[in-house]
Amino acid sequence: MDSHLQRAFDAIEQATAGLTATQIGRPQPGRWSIAEILEHLRLAYAVNAAALERIVASGQPKARRPGAMQWIARTLVIDAGYFPRVRAPEATTPAPGLAPEGIVAATLEALQALETALAKAAGRFGEDVPVLNHPYFARLSVRQWRRFHWRHTVHHMKQVQERRPGS
């Protein structure tokens, strides 16, 4: 596994270690529960992996040039690790009433599948060719997608840590 995605994998394992299904599913008034955070990540990994699989199969990267604001946002998030408060894209918004059982394993499986798709894309197009659009940043390369998913996971694992009992 790529070092960035390995760090994301490790961050999930660390942040969720020892949590019960009850703790993972505990509602958080006005915020996502730990289960919903994990489902958001699982969906992000799965949506990205599926899109990358389609791009690799077609042989044609699908990437548009970013505008100035997209470039600035991409730099802040991917390079600096700053996540402004934004609404999650609809495809990655968890459904209410999510069952917490198995969500950690499902999230880690989706991350592994994403790594597989990114490796295929890197093998087909290279690490630095823009391959796929991000909803907020426009085109990203395989290298940038890996960094994004690592930063995104770490951002959300800080939220998981805040929601752990006794925090």
Image (cartoon, rainbow, N blue to C red):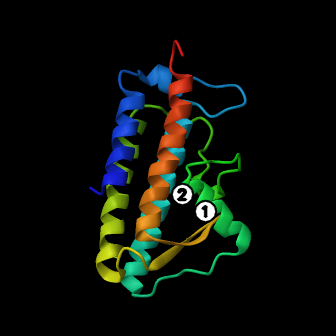
* Residue position marked by numbered label 1 in the rendering: 74
**What's the residue at 32%, 81% (across, down)?**
124
* Residue position marked by numbered label 2 in the rendering: 78
**What's the residue at 37%, 53% (across, down)?**
4
Q: Say if mark 2 contacts mark 1, CB within 8 Å.
A: yes
59 lies left or right of 77: left
Most foreground residue, 128 or 44: 128
Most foreground residue, 167 or 24: 167
Whether residue 11 is visible here, answered yes or no, is yes
120 lies left or right of 107: left
Mark 2 and mark 1: Cα distance apart in space: 6 Å
| Numbered disc 2: secondary structure | helix
In the image, farthest residue toward the top: 166
User: Number of callouts in the render?
Assistant: 2
Q: Please identify the quadrant where the N terminus is shown.
A: bottom left
Most foreground residue, 76 or 61: 76
**What's the residue at 56%, 32% (across, down)?**
159
Q: Please identify the quadrant where the C terminus is shown.
A: top right
145 lies left or right of 136: left
Residue 139 percent coordinates (x, y)? 56, 74
**What's the residue at 52%, 12% (across, down)?**
166
